[in-house]
Image: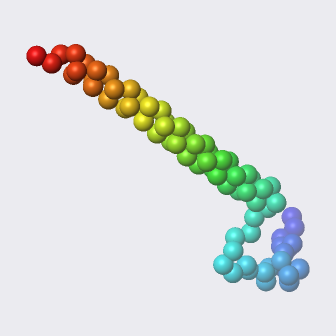
């Protein structure tokens, strides 16, 4: 049985300790970037839906106000 540690033979491997950053593999970094992009697109789509919903509700509110005005003018006693 081999009891020697591989990294003990190479000083660079055992001595390297990154400070303040986490070591990520390339695929992890790419996945993180892709997730960030997906979240950004989702946020932009939410904003677009909110804006279109606002315009739609303004139209409905205008229609309801005109209808109420017509109904009130017809039922004057």
Above or below, 44 relative to 77: below
Above or below, 18 relative to 31: below
Quadrant where the C terminus sits is: top left
40 and 54: which is toward the camera: 54
Percent x, y of residue 60: 41, 29
Q: Residue at x 73, y 57 (%)?
A: 33
25 and 72: which is toward the camera: 72
Visible residue check, residue 28? no
Q: Residue at x 22, y 16 (%)?
A: 74
Numbered label tally: 0
Percent x, y of residue 67: 32, 22
Percent x, y of residue 46: 56, 43
16 and 62: which is toward the camera: 62
Q: Residue at x 86, y 64 (%)?
A: 1
Asked which colour scheme the image uses, the reply is rainbow
Visible residue check, residue 51? yes
Where residue 10 sits, quadrant-wise, is bottom right
Does residue 31 appear to the left or right of 43 in the view shown?
A: right
Q: Residue furthest left?
A: 77
Above or below, 36 relative to 74: below
Percent x, y of residue 69: 27, 25
């Amino acid at each position: 049985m081999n009891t020697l540690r591989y990294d003990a033979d190479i000083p660079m491997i055992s001595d390297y300790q990154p400070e303040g950053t986490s070591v990520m593999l390339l695929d992890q970094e790419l996945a993180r970037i892709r997730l960030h992009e997906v979240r950004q697109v989702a946020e932009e789509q939410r904003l677009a839906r909110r804006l279109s919903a606002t315009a739609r509700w303004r139209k409905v509110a205008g229609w309801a106000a005109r209808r109420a005005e017509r109904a009130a003018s017809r039922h004057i006693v």
